Image: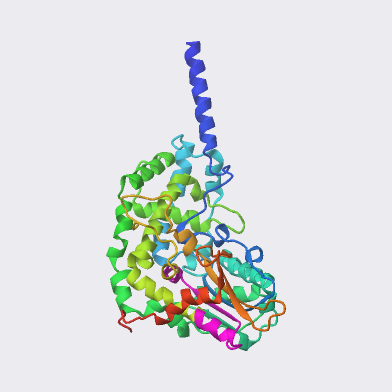
Amino acid sequence: MKLFIFITVLVTLVLKNVTSIDCYWSTECKYNYFSSKTSYENIRGDIRDSIVKAEGCEPINVWTMIRHGKKYPGSTFLEQIKDILHFKDYIISNYDNGNSSLCAQDVDNFREWKIETKFINEPSTLSNEGYQEMFRFGSRLKEALPEIFNDLNEEEYSFRPTLGSRGEVSAEALIKGLGYKDLFIEKAETNVSTGYPFGACKSYLREVFNNRDTYKTSLQYMESPEYANMKKRIEKRLGLSFSLTNKNVIAIYDLCRYISNGIDKEFSPWCAVFTEEDLKIIEYVGDLEHYFRSGYGSSKFSRTFGQIPLADLFKNFEQAKNNQGKKFIVYITKSTMMDMAMVALNVGKDESPLSAAHRDVNRKWRSTFSSTFGANLIAVLNRCRQPNETLYEHKIMLYKNERPFLELCDGGFCTWQEFEDIFKPFLKANTDICELD
């Protein structure tokens, strides 16, 4: 009898120890890649460290395309979130009744959590974190390239946001980060052709963006054994007496990724619902959606639209070579456009198409890095002259999310000829595939 009691106590202690290892709150390196809803802070480099200043070269022009900063969820997803907010009560009561395997501190974090008013009342608008993402990006740019950003006058810059207040507010934050109180921001409606070309293409909107078949593969994956087992694990972990729908799971996931703050290193209590493997599984759903909506799964449109802003980059640098045009141009766009630019550049392309049947953990297509909040492409044109030389040559440095764009040229460092070979063909981008409004 004593032996039985001893073994029971020992097993209990072991189980408690195993549970403590799995506590979300105490996990030092939390998984924070959430597809296109990842905080920019979680994936960025630092342009101040990455910037290449070659001997005899000076930067003369900067062209940037960037997704707006982090926003609050849109109306459709917000309604799904509202439908599961009461799950908080289930999570707490199930733990109190001994029916949950969550850790005490993780449950305490639920007890203390209240949803932000703006989260509910201001769908799709730029969040406080999103504003800081853009502000800090501008501040780092200025520190890295003072030759460009000191003493800008109106003829030397162009801020071009696409439709939606989050684009314009992102531009305002970026301007403040650059150290200016007030610079002119172009009206969003005038920039659809370059920064948001797919928005005026009836064929794309009908055949791809608003077509349910586009999302068929991601829905099939959500019916796969791997995804179903993940849902069962969550239900068991929370001690739920009912089955979660796929919309329930995504809503919980949204409360995890939208509320977590990369800059402040704060994590949403809702993230404790998932294991790291669970988060990787749900991340793949986002990758599938982006792949077939704006990636290689819809390349007929994606490649064409992705070429349009890249052609604009080439034209601006050609002008700058001849001491013409503006020295700083920034397009503030959306995730779809960032995906399409990567397709045009043949970046993130896997040998086999993404599928519902198999989640390749080593896949190249990752929406977390291509099109999350604040994702960006930075191009810097340098004018160079070696000692005792009379003629200038031009070199270009390309950056992706403030890191050298390793997939292009020599680790992102291009001669003019290399740059021209890649980008000049984009001038031939043809939108005849569209029925224009």
Residue 348 falls inside the magenta stretch: no
Instruction: Tell me where residue 369 appears, x and y as whole percent.
Output: 49, 60
Numbered marks: total: 0
> Is 241 positioned to the left or the right of 168 in the image?
left
Residue 326 falls inside the magenta stretch: yes
Q: Is residue 200 visible?
A: yes
Identified at 49% across, 53% down, the residue is: 256
Q: Is residue 164 visible?
A: no
Which region of the structure is painted magenta?
A: 314-341
Instruction: Indicate the colouring scheme.
Output: rainbow
Residue found at the very far front of the displayed protein: 388
Quadrant the C terminus occupies: bottom left
Identified at 48% across, 61% down, the residue is: 37
> Is 413 positioned to the left or the right of 425 in the image?
right
Identified at 55% across, 59% down, the residue is: 43
Q: Nearer the viewer, residue 316 or 332?
A: 316
> Is 396 positioned to the left or the right of 74 in the image?
right
Q: Is 87 placed above or below 288 here?
A: above
The image quarter containing residue 203 is bottom left
Instruction: Tell me where residue 33 appears, x and y as whole percent.
Output: 50, 54
Q: Nearer the viewer, residue 135 or 239?
A: 135
